[in-house]
Image (tube, rainbow, N blue to C red):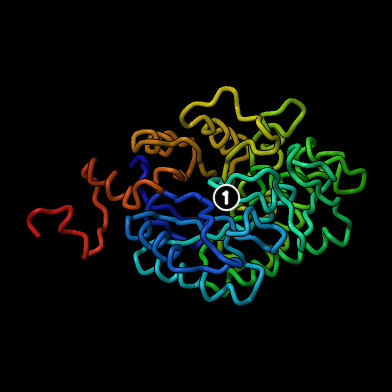
Amino acid sequence: MKENLFTPIQIRSLVLRNRIVMSPMCMYSSEDGFVNDFHITHYGSRAAGGTGLIFTEACAISPEGVISKQDLGIYKDEHVEGLKRIVDICHSFGAKVGIQLAHAGRKALGGRPWDRFDKFGYDDELEIIAPSPIPFANNWKTPKEMTKDDIKSVIEKFVKATQRALKAGFDVIEIHAAHGYLLNEFLSPITNKRTDEYGGTFENRIRLLIEIVEKVRATIPNEMPLFVRISATDHVEGGWSLEDSIALAKILKTKGVDVIDCSSGGIAFGAPPNDYYRAHQIVFSETIKKEANIMTMAVGGITSFDMANEIIKNKRADLVAIGRLFLQEPYLPIKWAMSRNIKIDIPNQYQRGYYLDI
């Protein structure tokens, strides 16, 4: 039988009820990294809507690693209780839950998209760090070039964040190495101008990510899936390329990574792909899946059931991550399934909305 969007999938010991994933999306609604009622409502409603796997927004591993000061965090033991509330409510509706561990690097403290700032990354207490002292744009703060001790500290913070994620009960760990944030900054020759063992050659630029992956994989149970989100290309001449991503994916597979989450861009200000179109990134998930022989997740501009289903049916990816549509429609999987007469579990409380004989 040919697989489709609603075919269950097993990754290590984890079984997802379908291939629909809610992509990590910043909500800019936290204070000091803590979960509040908004987050419980936001994630719980998408779980009730039939999603197979729900990712939290990027959870910062340190206070200076936040994308905005309103991000969720996992840099305090006290954060665990609230994150567990997210996990528990999603589990109660049959969804599995992943956490994206992140450090924003030179793009930290950038503010919320609806705020209008004259400058970004400025904070009296927190110092922004990056592989090299290159600001993201003219109105962004110049980051401090990381020392070896800074690098060691970041690795340790990823490990501690992973330990907290385990206590909160998450089903999947994803390491964020995309969109111009810290780990992506190490990967890309656009932002990494170091001359030590963490810069220069491809092998050196991937070193930090590989060390973090090894540490995280050693921390989590063998049966737990590990994802890595990458920017498959920088969309910048002389930057990180799809060929680099294929080579990296092959190495990550040997280190125990199960799924490559294939996004793109973010390293350079004002440099979106010139050939943007709906689902324009699917070529990355398809190519990496084929060339590296590893499971992939497609994301970006996927706007319909037919588009998402085609990706799975034609083996262009193993999972499909949806972002903006989930902001419009929490019950998107139920809506898609009902439109195609596909059987899907609907919470008892909501069945009257779909079946007239109840």
Q: Nearer the viewer, residue 290 or 296?
A: 296
Which residue occupies 75% across, 31% down? 239
The quarter of the displayed image where residue 304 is located: top left
| Coordinates of residue 39 in the picture (x, y in percent) | 46, 63
Tag 1 residue: 112
Q: Is residue 251 visible?
A: no
Residue farthest toward the left in the current orientation of the protein: 357
In percent of the image, x 33 and y 55: which residue is there? 50
Residue visible at 31% across and 52% down in the picture: 331
Point out residue 7 in the picture as x, y percentages from the top left corner. 36, 48
| Residue 61 or residue 170, whichever sits in front | 61
Q: Position of residue 8 (x, y in %)?
A: 38, 52
Quadrant where the image shows the N terminus? top left
Residue type pointed to by label 1? Arg
What secondary structure is found at the residue carrying circle 1?
loop
Residue 219 vs residue 284: left or right?
right
Going by the image, does 20 lie left or right of 258?
A: left
| Left or right: residue 24 compared with residue 252 | left
Give the left or right position of residue 70, taking residue 50 as reference: right
Q: Which residue in the rendered view is the most extreme toward the top?
A: 275
Residue at left offset 72%, top offset 60%: 64
